[in-house]
Image (cartoon, grey):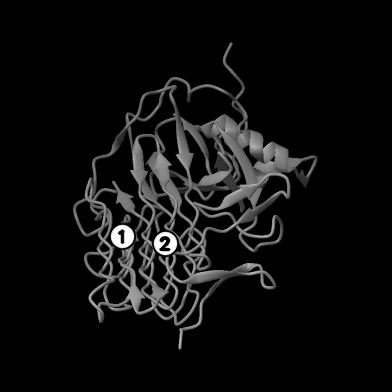
Amino acid sequence: MKAPRSRRGDTNQVASYWAGGSGGNPPPTVEYLVIAGGGSSGYSGGGGGAGGYRNSTSGEATGGGGSAESAFVVSGGTTYTVTIGAGAPGYPMGDGGNSVFGTITSTGGGKGGHDAGGFVYTAGNLGGSGGAGASTYYGGGGSGPRVTNPIQGNVGGNNGGDGGGAGASGSTGAASSITGTSVTRAVGLSGGGSGGANSGSGGGRTGSWGGDGGSGIVIIRYLLSFDPAVVTGSPTLTTSGSYRIYQFTGSGTITF
Amino acid sequence: MAHFARIENNTVVNVIVVHNNELLVDGVENEQKGRDFCHNLLGGEWVQTSYNNNFRKHYACIGSTYNEIADEFVPPKPEGDFHWDESALRWVASPPVG
């Protein structure tokens, strides 16, 4: 007897109704966008780096401007963990949290460098995108590097500049239409701004305690011709064109 | 959205975002349900934290200390010349000397 599936895939808020795979017709591959939490800016220093931006959406770029990654190969009936990394708060400063989908990990954005007192300025931290350095006036405080395996963002700026973003260069964000609508995320903000929820953007530089990093997001899509997935974590399910799209703004699981 | 901090040896090692729906028991948010959700997802011990500092004194970020007796988080000291202000209950930059 087949397990009950009457409510799967027919509401926007999907809960865990059934433990098991998607039945007889799981997708062989899925496309994903996995964005980590943004780093905070540094105290009187540089902007925070955006969260790592890993994108396999066909025809789009991944973080740092490279070609999209390969689609994720699915094993039907296997449950994959989805983790949404938190953004780092401007006080007391820090790196963003990692976001994860199965074996795909995006690294949190690096904290911006800060004024440590006594004419000491720290460098931006390593991250999916690096934090900006606080100042190089006294010979310290360089830009924060980016993770390179794989590249998923950009290095941070310098001299109290903006943190790295996920676009082709610098602090710009990256746009994706994985949901059917183009949205730019993972920006290295400036001017004291805070990254919004699920943006993955880095906190903007300020003259004091700084901007907060935005939390991450995970979006997964595949063709409607395959069965709906079984999920936990209350992702939003939508359709666009020929795609079924799950947006996780909180952590959970997905079983195809 | 709710935030949960993973605690190891009284230190915060990870903070994740959880949908509020996962905390609901009869329509009311229940922290223990959220803790169980995180444990079942990733293992380990989890404690809820407030991004707006509405409970447990401070938002837990990676490197924060969790004082289990007082049931509150203490933020990590920033690198450099900062001191703890008891009246403000936060780290502040030390004034320049001289």
Instruction: Provide residue A181's location: percent of width, then percent of height.
Output: 40, 60
Q: Give the residue number, with chain letter if any, for mark 2.
A: A39
Horizontal relation, residue A45 to residue A16: left or right: left
Q: Secondary structure at mark 1?
A: loop
Tag 1: amino acid: Ser
Host chain of mark 1: A
Q: Residue at position x 57%, y 59% from top?
A: B75
> How far across and how far down the image is residue B38, in percent?
58, 37
The answer to which of A51 and B91 lies nearer the viewer is: B91
Name the amino acid, label 2.
Answer: Gly
Q: Residues within 10 Å of mark 1 (few under 14, many from 20)?
A: many
Asked which secondary structure carries label 2, the reply is loop
State the CA–CA distance, disc 2 to disc 1.
9 Å
Q: Position of residue A46 (x, y in %)?
A: 36, 74
> Seen in the image, is A141 located left or right of residue A207?
left
Q: Which one is in front, B78 or B60? A: B78
Question: Residue at label 1?
Answer: A129
